[in-house]
Amino acid sequence: MTRNRVDQLFRGLTLRARGLLANAAPDRVILSRRYQKAFGRPLDLRHPESFNEKLYWLRLYYRTPLVTTLTDKYPADHLRAPAGGPGGGQPGRVRLPLLRR
């Protein structure tokens, strides 16, 4: 085997191992590591102060069906206003359903 082929096999195995470990780790651990790498300080989810910490908190704990619908491309397609349709809707504008409190 050539050195290049060994490097390719090793790279493939490490990528596969990372994928398996990422799927086994909880979301909180993955997001904490990502935050630490991006901002150089630990993520505080108990008392989020910065805007980015609050966004990470929302990603972890704010799970509603509306968020899922809006992030999926095809289910959210019916929410988009047609171009020049009734009421002169602008293309790309989103009509959100009424939320009950």
Image (cartoon, rainbow, N blue to C red):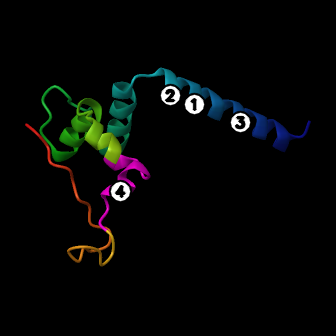
Instruction: State which region is magenta.
Output: 70-81
Q: Is 36 positioned to the left or the right of 74 in the image?
A: left
Q: Amino acid at mark 1?
A: Gly
Foreground: disc 4 or disc 3: 4
Q: Which residue is depicted at the point 33% across and 70% down? A: 82
Instruction: Tell me the CA gap for discs 3 and 1.
Output: 11 Å
Q: Position of residue 28 (x, y in %)?
A: 33, 26
Q: Which residue is depicted at the point 20% across and 74% down? A: 87
Instruction: Tell me the CA gap for discs 3 and 2.
Output: 15 Å
User: In this picture, is 44 found above or below 87?
Assistant: above
Q: Is 64 positioned to the left or the right of 23 in the image?
A: left
Q: Badge 4: few (under 14), some or many (20 or more) residues near its Cα, within 10 Å?
A: few
Near-viewer residue (52 or 91): 91
Q: Where does label 1 land, which residue?
A: 19
Which label is found at residue 12? Answer: 3
Q: Where does label 2 land, which residue?
A: 22
Q: Badge 2: few (under 14), some or many (20 or more) residues near its Cα, within 10 Å?
A: few
Q: Secondary structure at mark 1?
A: helix
Q: Where does label 4 land, which residue?
A: 78
Q: Amino acid at mark 4?
A: His
Q: Is 13 positioned to the left or the right of 4 in the image?
A: left
Q: Earlier in the sequence, mark 1 or mark 4?
A: 1
- Outermost residue toward the front in this view: 86
Q: Is 27 positioned to the left or the right of 50 in the image?
A: right
Q: Secondary structure at mark 3?
A: helix
Q: Amino acid at mark 3?
A: Gly
Q: Earlier in the sequence, mark 3 or mark 2?
A: 3
Q: Are marks 2 and 1 in contact (CB under 8 Å)?
A: yes
Q: Secondary structure at mark 4?
A: helix
